Each structure stands twice: as structure tokens, then as C-alpha cells.
Image: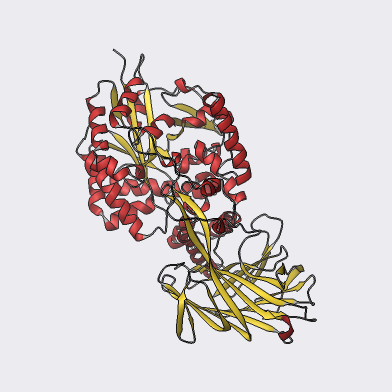
Amino acid sequence: MPQPVSLLFGVHAHQPVGNFREVLDDAHWRCYRPFLQLLERFPDFHFSLHISGWLLDDLLTRYPDDIALLKTMVARGQVELFCAGYTEPVLAAIPVRDRIGQVNLMSARFEQVFGQRPSGAWLTERVWDSGVVPSLVACGVRYVTVDDYHFLCAGKREDELSGYFSTEEDGRRLDIFPISEALRYRLPFSPAIDAVRYLESLAGEGEGRAAVYFDDIEKFGIWPETYDWVYTRGWLEEFVQRVLDSPLVRPQRYSDYHAAYRTRGVVYLPTTSYIEMNEWTLPAEASAIYAGLVEEARQTGHYDKGKPFLRGGIWRNFLSRYPESNWMHKRMLSLSARFSSLSDARRTLDMRNALYEAQANDAYWHGLFGGLYLPHLRRAVYSALIRLEGMLDKASHRPEFECVDLDLDGHPEYFVQNGVLQAVVCSDGRADIRELDHYRLGHNFGDTLMRQREHYHHKVILNRETAHEGEGISNPHDRVSFKQVIGPEDLVFDPFPRSLFIDRIVLGDESRVVRYEGQAAPDAGPSLQFKAVEGGGLVKRIGLDGENLNVTYEFAELPAGDFEVELNLAMPSCDGPAGRFEMQGEILGGFGQPQESDLTEIVLRDEVLGGTLRLSANQPGRWRSAPCFSVSQSEAGFEKIMQAVTLHLRWPCERLASPLVIRLWMG
């Protein structure tokens, strides 16, 4: 009789910091509650669970009965808890001090709520970097899970991966379980009987054979088609019952297996994540080459053997690929350093919590998942950063003017702040404002996204659907679907990042961006001054006055044509009903509707923001606006997402004999 295979079944529950209330509630009703209620009926089905700290706190507040149910399952030994960073950061992307702080906070919270301090850790997005080993060990973590792909990349064979292995960094030992890709793609998408038969096929001679599974719990109710399949049609109950009835499958907690069996030996894994992530993190051109190599390997029958060596990028490539992601990350690192430099007496829990919220992974990357394209998730990061910066400024003085190449792009940034507002201006030639913060509102009006070519745009252009074949339901990794009609006009890409106060000289159908030279020097008060390389001796001044941002333009000689200023404003309401344009007391329409009119004073009122932005100029001109959309993908399909309100302000140059002053009032 073959020896039973140990089913190490683990699920990971997480919602991004700043996610919509309705999304959280829907996840609870369609996934978290029915999953726990069903498995509570089967105490012999042992499994492991990681739940992120922010989600745990939300469920404790909104749905305490669910947590009480989980407490019961933990207390009777059915469930083992796995820790991670409290706000679900990618540990390899944050400082060591914050890695240890985040993991210890999560473990302490589990111990407080459930009476169990975890020995295992879930690695966010299964991003492995050996540099995190000492930090995890310092927090009492003894083992983690990563994909079997990580092991294949290290030269291991698939038939070797039926237990756990050991690694070390700086002499600190950590054990690693390889998650089965075959199980990830079967559960819950294939029929329960087929999934259990596959598990039974893994039983064999010798003790200690393990089938390792750890993946998103949202696959069991939230992903497309899954609620009906998993609960209404009974997939999960049938799967659990068949596992318990099988003499060849034994559900175990990771902790029990780890205590009962020895390591399979030492292994050193390369820096990588799951195989799909390694494609998503590549720029579109490189991703196309990579996808072509993969398809060629599939066609020639070499893929299964060669896939570990057809390796894409690493998670950190998102930081070099998306300037917006890199900027948030470097702002976070800078503020983390300021926080850590404070004396213990000056540090507060509010500061620490804001820092940890800013480290949540979701808004830093994009693929089939990830939330860089979602404005409300970026807004949550910036809200935390701005709150933290405001608290740090009160605890330790910061000058009104600073110059530093924060994002490591070779061009210094100029930080100008007055305690109410902050403007960050880049020195790469456009003298545009990349970040515009209002501390009381906790909002960055410059938080938008450059429209880049993505690896999935060819699927949008082909505009085709791939149907799932056979029994079961479709896996989002294998299908193409469209939530909205997307046309060629939606796939227009930007030559450089979007920002505020991009200046152009327009002559007929042609326009050129004004280039500014030299280093900006602080003027009287918190302000900057730039001089154009050409274009009538244009001088541009950027200054702060209370809640006002004043941008002044002065021409020594008037060029031909029109002078145009572009502003890309991040308004939280986007194209929803809570945001609108107003002029002279009349409502013109929502932010998602194109507008055009004479320029006097424009009011942008946003109920989500809880504030108002007023735009005015001292000389008459024209203004027009249009929503800026980007094309994004998610497990639910392709969609258009509004990133910013794009305003174009225009004046005939011949009328600009006196200085032009554009004022933004935020409050």
C-alpha cells in the first residue's frame, strides 16, 4: 500500500490598504465567511492561513463573528497561522529595520487575537530574496513557502520537491517549502474528483511525501465564476470530503509536517517570484521577446524542461519600469530613514503606522494583479506618506528648500514647502511639478500615471476572447476578457511622465515643450525660478503662499503662436458622481466629461477628497479639459481607468506683455 501524501493546504487572505468599502464587504460575503463556515464543519481538515494585518483589523471591527469562528478553529488545532509583514509589503523592498518591525507586529497581533505566535511566514507575491532570511529568523520564523519554480531555477528536479529544504544567509537557517504549480492551477479550477485523484497519484513509497499548496483565498469565491463553482455548486465541500475519505491523502498543518520530518537538504534559491510575475515585470518589448521564446519552447516541446532557464525579470524591475512606482518607493525610503533617526521619545505609533501603510505592496506593481493602475490604492500610499511627513516635520525641523536626486534618475528634485503645501519640481528640463501635496487634505494632486505600452496590449488590439475548454472553470491566467469596449484611441502612449505645469509654445498644428536650463535657486520665501533655453527669454517662477501655489511666467520677448500650460490633476472622484467642475456658481459637469470655456476661475469640487481646488489666472485665456484614461488588466478583464483630469490652458502670446500668473488654491 503506498504511503499517504501529506496535503499541506494553505490560503492567503489580503486586501490592499485603502481598498473600497464595497470591495471589502463583497470579499467577506463571497469568500471569507463562506470559506470559514464550511471548513469549520470539518475539524479533521487541517490547513494553514495567512491574513494580512490591515484586513484582520477590518474584519475584527466589521465582522467579529468571522474572527471568533477562526479563533475556535485555531484553538482546536485545525488551523495554523502564518505571519508576514503587517501591511503586506514585499519584504525585500523595504529596509531591514522595517522588515523586522512589520513581521514582529504581525506575529504579536496574531498572538494577541488568537493566542498563537506563527512559526511560518507567507512571502508577499512569493518574492524570494535571500537577503530577507536573517530578518525572518530574527522574528522567530522557521519556514516559508515559495513556488516550486524557484527550486527548478536552482536546478532541482520536480520529482525531488515533495518535502521541505533548508537554506541559510549569514549563518541563519530557514526552511523552505516548494508550492506546487500543478496544484495552483488545479485548485479550485478542475473538478474536485480530478483534483483529489491527482493528489492520490502523489502517494508513493517512503514516508514524508508532501503536496504543497499555498495561494490566494480569493480564488475561492471572488475570482470570476468561482463563487458559484466553489459554494453554490459545492466544489469546496466535495473536495474536502473526498480528501478526508481518501486513504492516500492526509491533510496536515505545515507545523505538524515540519516537526515530523527532516529537511531534504540544503538549497540556495535565485532572486525570483512566481513565473507569471517574471513576465509582468518586464517592459513591453522585452516581455514580447520573452513570451515569444516561451511559445517557441512550447511548440518544440522543450518548455517543461527549459522554463526554469527562460527566466524573466525580478519584482524590483517594477521600480525601474514605472517612474511613479519608483518615486513612491524612494519617498518611502527617505521618510523611513527620517523616522528611524528620531529618538525613541519622539517616535509615535501614528508615525510607525503611517510608514507601514506606505509600504503595502499593492500600489507599487502591475500585472494580472497589483494595483499601480488603481488611483485609490496609490492615493492610500500618498496619504500615508504625507501624514508621516507632516508628523516628522513637527517632530524635527525641515528646511523650506531642499535639493536631492531622490529617485536616482540623475536629475535632482527641488522640494519647496511651507508646512501647508509642498511642491516637488524636477530639474530634467521641463520645470514641471511632479508632486503637489496638501498636508491637511493628505493628498498629492500630482498623483497620476504615465500611459505606457504594456505586454497585454496586443491582446486588446486583437480583441479576442479565449474560451475555457473541458470541465471545471477558467483560470484568469489563461483567458482574455473585456469589461469595457476599448478602441485604438485608448492605446495612445505618453512620451514622458504626466505632471503639472508642462509648458508649450503652439504654432498652428505644431507644438514644442518649453525647455528650461540651469539649476533653480531659491527665491524670496519658499519659491523657485527657472529660465527657458529659448522662447522669448521666458522666466518661470514657482512659489507657495499659504494654501496657494503661484506659477508666474514672464517673457522678455513675445514669441509667435500661443502659450499653453498643461496640468494633470489627480482628483479622487475620477469620473464618478462625487466630482464636478463649477464656474461662477454653475455646475458645468463631472471630471469625466470634456469641457471648454473662457478662463476666469474654475472650481474643481471633490466630495471624496473633502476639499476644493480653485484655478485662476490674472489674464483672460481659454481652458479645456478631458479625462485621461489608461488601459489596465485584472483577473476580471481589461478596463479603462481614469487617472487624471487633464487641463490645457492657452493664451495668445501677443497678449502676454505683462507677467502671467496662474494660481491654484487648495483647501
Residue 563 place in picture, x, y as percent = 70, 76
Residue 21 place in picture, x, y as percent = 34, 60
Residue 19 in which image quadrant: bottom left
Instruction: Determine the residue positioned at 38% across, 51% down.
Output: 53
Instruction: Determine the residue positioned at 60% across, 41% down.
Output: 288
Q: Quadrant of the N terminus?
A: top left
Taking depth in this image into account, of 44 and 308 the one nearest to the observer is 308
* Left or right placement of residue 44 versus residue 121 in this view: left
Instruction: Determine the residue positioned at 52% across, 61% down.
Output: 629
Residue 9 place in picture, x, y as percent = 34, 33
Instruction: Determine the residue positioned at 38% across, 54% down.
Output: 54
Residue 333 place in picture, x, y as percent = 57, 55
Residue 523 in which image quadrant: bottom right
Residue sitting at the far left? 41
Taking depth in this image into account, of 341 and 491 the one nearest to the observer is 491
Q: How many marks?
A: 0
Colouring: secondary structure
* Viewer can see residue 253: yes
Image height of 54 relative to 184, above or below: below
* Viewer can see residue 419: no
* Left or right placement of residue 432 versus residue 213 in this view: right
Image height of 187 relative to 52, above or below: above
* Left or right placement of residue 647 versus residue 515 in this view: left
